[in-house]
Image: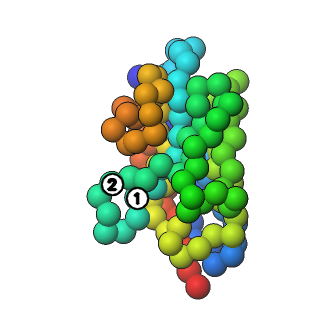
Amino acid sequence: QVQLVESGGGSVQVGGSMRLSCEGSGLQARSYCMGWFRQVPGKERREAVAIPDRNGGFIYYPDSVKGRFTVSRDNAKNTLSLQMNTLKPEDTGMYYCALDFQCAGWGQEHFAYWGQGTQVTVSS
């Protein structure tokens, strides 16, 4: 059974940094895409914030986080980390790690497996 467990998160002041990690288990040596999403207060849809492709050759970042967020993947450990720098109040939200065996796209609808989420709060 696939399980994703996030760690990190918490509260930080504007301009600060934070690192999130996600560890996957039950993947049975299958290839996959794993990425980070966030859900901000008041919005139902989860926004993709960092998604490497299957081989890590391309990474999707929305314009809102480009240059500030960096994702890294350790295939040997099935982990995905997200380094977030120069955090802004609008980065506040619940951050989720998600996994897709098909690597069909960047939308939340393509990801079948989700972690429980970790809260990130950026205050001024």
Q: Residue at x 70, y 59 (%)?
A: 67
> Please, which residue is most extreme toward the top here?
29
* Image marks 2 and 1: residues in contact by CB distance under 8 Å: yes
> Disc number at residue 101?
none
- Looking at this view, name the residue that lies furthest to the front: 63
Q: Residue at x 44, y 59 (%)?
A: 94
Question: Could you tell me residue 90's position as x and y percent?
Answer: 50, 72
Instruction: State the residue position of label 1.
Output: 39
1 or 106, which is in the foreground? Answer: 106
Task: Locate residue 19 relative to residue 32 in the image: left or right.
Answer: right
Give 11 or 57, whichever is nearer the viewer: 57
The disc placed on residue 45 is: 2
Precedes in sequence: disc 2 or disc 1: 1
Type of amino acid under label 1 = Gln
Count how many numbered circles sit on residues in the image.
Answer: 2
At 68% across and 30% down in the image, what residue appears? Answer: 57
Q: Is residue 96 visible?
A: yes
Query: Is 72 located above or below residue 17 in the figure?
Result: above
